[in-house]
Image: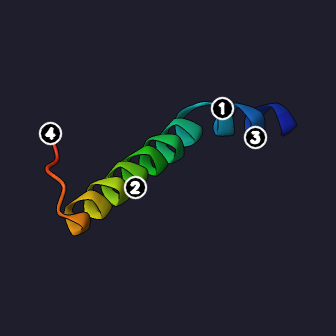
Amino acid sequence: MRRAEMWLWSGPVGHLIGGALDFAEALARYRRARRRGQTVH
C-alpha cells in the first residue's frame, strides 16, 4: 500500500497538483501586475 501511495503522489496526482499550483501562481502574478498598471508581456 505504501508503494502505491508514493507512486500516486510522485506520479500523476503530484504532477497535476504541481501544475495547478504553478498556474495559480502565474495567474496571481498576472492579476497583481495588471492591478498596478504594469504591462504584461
The percent position of residue 15, horizontal first and vertical second, equals: 52, 36
Mark 4 or 2: in front is 4
Q: Quadrant of the N terminus?
A: top right
The percent position of residue 14, horizontal first and vertical second, equals: 59, 39
Residue at 23% x, 69% y: name it.
Answer: 35
Between residues 34 and 21, which one lies in front from this camera angle?
Answer: 34
Between residues 40 and 14, which one lies in front from this camera angle?
Answer: 40
- Contact between marks 4 and 3 (CB within 8 A): the answer is no
Describe residue 1's horizontal placement relative to residue 17 as left or right: right
In the picture of the structure, the residue carrying the numbered disc 4 is: 41
Distance between mark 4 and mark 3 Cα atoms: 40 Å
Amino acid beneath label 3:
Glu
Between residues 28 and 41, which one lies in front from this camera angle?
Answer: 41
Mark 4 or 3: in front is 4
Distance between mark 2 and mark 3 Cα atoms: 25 Å
The first of marks 3 and 1 along the sequence is 3
Mark 3 or 1: in front is 1
The first of marks 4 and 1 along the sequence is 1
The first of marks 4 and 2 along the sequence is 2
Mark 4 or 1: in front is 4
Distance between mark 2 and mark 1 Cα atoms: 20 Å
Residue 18 is tagged as none
Amino acid beneath label 2:
Ala
Residue at 40% x, 55% y: name it.
Answer: 24
In the picture of the structure, the residue carrying the numbered disc 3 is: 5
In the picture of the structure, the residue carrying the numbered disc 1 is: 10
